[in-house]
Amino acid sequence: MTKAASAAAKDLAAAGVRGVHVSWADNNGIPRSRIVPIGGLGGAASRGVGVTALFAVFDSHDRITYEHPGLATPSGDVRLIPVIERLSRLAGQPALAWTPARQVAADGSPWPYCQRGVLERQVALAANKGFELRAGFELEFAVAPLDSPDIESAPGHGGPAYSPHALVPLDGFVDALLHDFEANGLRIGQLHAEYGLAQIELSLGATDPVSAADDQLLARQTIHAAARAHGLRVSFAPMVSPEAAGNGWHLHTSIRRKGRNLLAGQDGPGNDGAGYLAGLLRELPALTAITAPSVPSTARLRPGYFASAYAFWGVENREAPLRYVPASALLGDDHANVELKPCDASANPYLALAVVLAAGLAGIDERLELPRPIEEDPGTWSPGERSTQDVRRLPASPAEQASELSAATWVADVLGDELLGAFRSVRESDAAWAKDRPIEEVVRAHLWRY
Ligand code: GLU
Ligand code: MG
């Protein structure tokens, strides 16, 4: 790999690239990185780049918590190994390139806190059982002028939602997105002016889970750079104001065996596909604590915003946390998938995919039965009706998330005790920060973090 890295570095240097962001996402979904000069990429590929082990216990406000026993002192170093197969020049920052990082222990052995490693392990376990996941994220974000302190005081577009007119003032930015995504090797499914305040949505093409998570990180970097070049800034935060619709980063997945999409089928998914959906449904409350984990995430999950609030599934039901998208004669079997709505930019994308895959496979293994889909919005039902239909609220506070995680022992099998311990202390640190602050201040503090 060193040889391949050195050869790639030579080509990039000849093309004017001076440095490479070696990047990963922490337990708050916040991307972090080290820039390596291009001439040092070969060395970094074999020896890694040193960083403190404490990144596993950074909270959303860049505070370090020492409450997790495995990382309770300022001592300790890990190495970031650039994933050279994913090396990409950044079209919007032409002097720089980007790679995701593997985090390994100082001696090169696996490090239990590496989120990418957790997902690689789940993917390998699934492959051993003959299953393959396909995944793609949908990214919603809000746009404002570069010097704006928030979105509300100067929304970057004024709607109408879904209208081509809304994007006219952002023409240069949209052009840059279309150009830079392609140049950076990312596939956009579609892009539009979304329903929320100054909101845009862009969907990424489906691929294998590790690539989907890598793509999501590269997409963020690409969008930030394109915005900056056009005098704009973007917020990926789950909430941009307590009143406005939030930013969901919905996660679309389908599960396959021998290349066949198990979610496809004339009358809905067959047994295994139904098992996959039932597994996700059973584990939704704990899943949500990983896929929508921040304090603003819990505020986003309200009824009436297409963001999901109650644990149920539906066919093309926009209020459902699990929106089943069937195959059709027009679109073919490949198209069938399920959208997980309670997922956002504060989730680490590798961990989000790892728990989704594990929960879905458990459903197949255990041949779980899928209840009937719900067509309505249970948010409009009485508490009695919800309880008769066995529809529970998704966790709506850090304390509820914590108790769902304690109850779901399978999450420790997926994340490992070390990583889960670090993740939970980070959530506790965030919750303590937010405890006596009004929601406006909490939302503002997360606005530009992702
Ligand atoms: N903005 C909504 C959310 O918070 C999603 C709207 C939609 O695309 O259905 O997830
Ligand atoms: Mg949307």
Image (cartoon, helix red, strand yellow):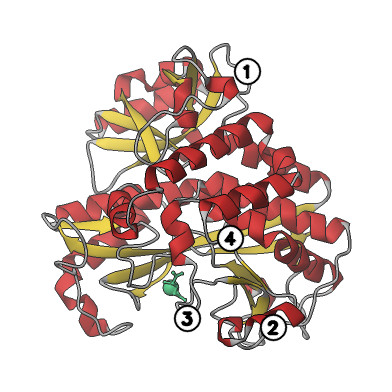
Q: Position of residue 281 (x, y in %)?
A: 71, 66
Left or right: where 113 falls relative to 131: left
Q: Amino acid at mark 2?
A: Gly
Between 68 and 3, the residue placed more toward the observer is 68
Left or right: where 74 falls relative to 419: left
Q: Amino acid at mark 3?
A: Gly
Q: Nearer the viewer, mark 1 or mark 4?
A: 4
Sequence-earlier tag: 3 or 4: 3
Query: From the Cβ of disc 3, is ligand 1 less than 8 Å away?
Result: no
User: Which residue, as the protein is rendered here, is positioned at the far front?
Assistant: 436
Q: Nearer the viewer, mark 1 or mark 2?
A: 2
Sequence-earlier tag: 1 or 4: 1
Q: At numbered mark 3, what does the secondary structure look like: helix, strand or loop? A: loop
Q: Quadrant of residue 359?
A: bottom right
Between 318 and 296, the residue placed more toward the observer is 296
Q: Mark 3 to mark 2: distance in Å? A: 19 Å
Q: Position of residue 31 (x, y in %)?
A: 39, 40
Q: Residue at x 49, y 45 (%)?
A: 214
Query: From the Cβ of disc 1, is ligand 1 less than 8 Å away?
Result: no
Q: Residue at x 30, y 70 (%)?
A: 199
User: Badge 1 is on which residue?
Assistant: 109
User: Badge 4 is on which residue?
Assistant: 395
Q: Are marks 1 and 2 in contact (CB under 8 Å)?
A: no
Q: Is residue 247 above or below residue 11?
A: below
Q: Quadrant of residue 335?
A: bottom right
Q: Nearer the viewer, mark 4 or mark 2?
A: 2
User: Badge 3 is on which residue?
Assistant: 304
